Amino acid sequence: MSDLRVGSMVTEDNGEGAAVVMVHGLGGTSNSFQSLMPVLSGYRVLRPDLPGAGRSAYRPGIASMDGLAICLTECLQAAGIGKAHFVAHSMGTLVCQYLAARSPDIVASLVLFGPMLEPPAAARTGLKDRAEAARRDGMAGIADAVSSGSVSAASRTANPVTQTFVRESLMRQDPAGYASHCQILGEALAADHSAIQCPTLLVAGENDPVTPVDMASALSSRITDSRLVVIPAIGHWMMIEAVDTSAELLRGHLDGITS
């Protein structure tokens, strides 16, 4: 394993083979996908911390989904990779949709966990308020609210470590970087789905309050070559709440394309 650095962005670089780039969501880091790494043997896996998240310093000049998508393009260029499979969670799924629409030649396929179409009006207001709260009060209150509200009740009971993981991920965020991502997401519109032509797997949680099944279904109807799988009794963090199922779906999708 090594670290690839592009500007302020730090990317974990593991393995050899066809390239897979894993893009975390709001409040996430490269660790959001750690539970899936064991099934990715035979692939070269890049896991960036987006600027302002995890180990990547906040870059004030990045203020849009397009800006974050360009960061991924720069990451691939620095790694000497011409084309990759992109795996993403939550906000990261929207970043990857933008990337697939603007640079289809570098996207072999998409796997979108907790897939996002665009934030509804109420969520946009909530994201603006959350950005202000992060800048004013830091991350503790946000971490408590997100970790309790985005994990399903079944997961909190059966596997309490899930909620702990989510809270820790939020607590480790730089408040300014997190606020910037809230602002970017709160202002984002849907991608141009007519331009996305790659095979796409969408994985939704049955009890996800952040990106509900109806949103995933609407997104699937807009992407031509897509398939939607709903995992029962799971919330927004399916890679942690339903590790085995998520890993099986991911590996099956990748192997079905690269074989």
Image (spheres, rainbow, N blue to C red):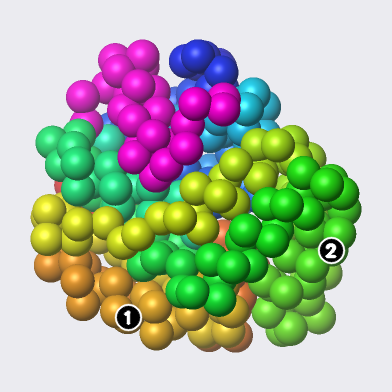
| Quadrant where the N terminus is found in the figure | top right
The type of residue carrying mark 2 is Asp
Q: Residue at x 86, y 59 (%)?
A: 141
Is 91 placed above or below 14 here?
A: below
Which residue corresponds to mark 2?
144
Question: Where in the figure is residue 64, as x and y percent of width and height?
Answer: 42, 42
SS majority, magenta: helix
Q: Magenta includes 76?
A: yes
Q: Residue 242, how many percent across, how many down? A: 59, 69
In the shown orientation, is residue 78 left or right of residue 168?
Answer: left
Q: How many C-alpha atoms fall within 10 Å of the one at disc 2: few (<14), some, or many (≥20)?
A: some
Q: Is residue 17 above or below residue 210?
A: above
116 in relation to 149, above or below: above
Is any atom of residue 229 visible in this view?
no
Q: Residues within 10 Å of mark 1 (few under 14, many from 20)?
A: some
Can you tell which quarter of the image residue 17 is in?
top left
Span colored in magenta: 59-83
Q: Which residue is mark 1?
A: 217
Measuring from the top left, give residue 83's x and y in whole percent: 22, 31
Question: What residue is at 73 percent from the left and 65 percent from the top?
Answer: 146
